[in-house]
Image: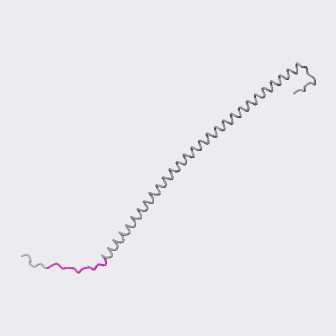
Amino acid sequence: MAKAPKTITLVDKKLQTAGLKAALKNHGELIKGITVEQKAAEKALAAAKKSADAEIKEAEKAAAAKRKASDAAIAAAQKAYAAAVAKADKSAAAAAKGTEKLTAQLAALEAMPIAAAVKAPAKVLEAA
């Protein structure tokens, strides 16, 4: 900016004062515009954060529901497995008893003495 002369006429002073006041007013309006834009950006950021938080909360809720369903499915599968193992154990015990019984019967049969052979009676009448 050029150096202002040390003396100025009244008209020039009024003109320059009016120009500076107008520039100051425009400058103030620009600052207000910047402030309004900044507040609008802050509101948009807050809305985006709120929306993102809501989506995260909804996703966590859905994940919790899936986790609960998965846990229930696992519990049901474990219960079915335990029942199958118990049934298999019962069947194995019954099969072992059956094997013991058959083995005992076979041992008893093998230990049984064999009776002497009985001869058939002689034919009394021979065919004529």
Q: Quadrant of residue 97?
A: bottom left
In this view, the residue in front, 72 or 103, is: 72
Q: Is residue 71 above or below residue 53?
A: below
Q: Which quarter of the rendering shows the C terminus?
A: bottom left
Q: Which residues are magenta?
A: 110-121
Question: Residue 46: horizontal and vertical position, in percent?
Answer: 66, 38
- The magenta stretch spans residue 115: yes
Q: Residue furthest left?
A: 128
- The answer to whether residue 31 is left or right of residue 113 is right
Residue sitting at the far right: 6
Residue at coordinates 67% horizontally, 36% vertically from top-left?
A: 43
- Please check the rendered image and state whether residue 63 is part of the magenta-colored stretch, yes or no: no
**Residue 80 drawn at (x, y percent):** 44, 57
User: Residue 59: where, in percent of width, then height?
Assistant: 57, 44
Q: Main secondary structure of the magenta part?
A: loop
Locate residue 30 relative to residue 94 in the image: left or right.
right
